[in-house]
Amino acid sequence: ALPAQAELTQGGRAWAVYFAVEPNGSAALTAAAARTKAMGLELYNKDPGCDVEPSTPPPAVDSEAIEIMLLAAYYPTEAEARQVAAAFGEPAPWVGEVKTMCLD
């Protein structure tokens, strides 16, 4: 069984698993959403700018693209986040600690 997801708070910190950082409506975003839904995950589909102060740099975003969306789940600990990332498989999701914003 996968671990319980974190309760996010405005300005709080959590371990993020980024399943996709892609243009809204793209095939890659749709495919990642379908795979994570099949895993039973509740996901955040949001602007990548809503997560700040990452522990390590997340994947580069194509600044030319319109409406880049972030497909992510959040966990209380690094071990839990890495367990979910491993269950997802390839392409390997980015895992890092972030400060969560845009929640109010």
Image: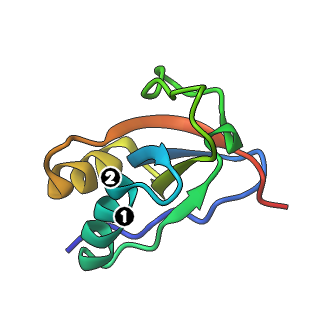
Q: Is residue 98 left or right of residue 43?
A: right
Where residue 63 appears, as percent x and y from the top left, is 60, 26
Residue in front for this viewpoint, 22 or 43: 22
Residue in front for this viewpoint, 42 or 61: 61
* Residue at the (48%, 60%) spot, across then down: 25
Q: Could you say which disc has been placed on residue 28 in the image?
A: 2
Where residue 75 appears, as percent x and y from the top left, is 45, 55
Pointers 1 and 2 in contact (C-beta within 8 Å):
yes
Q: Is residue 27 left or right of residue 50?
A: left
Q: Can residue 95 be seen in the rendering of this structure? A: yes
Where residue 88 appears, as percent x and y from the top left, is 20, 56
Report the residue marked by disc 1.
Answer: 30
Residue in front for this viewpoint, 100 or 72: 72
* Residue at the (55%, 61%) spot, across then down: 45
Separation of residues labelled 1 and 2 (CA atoms) = 5 Å
Q: Is residue 37 left or right of residue 65?
A: left
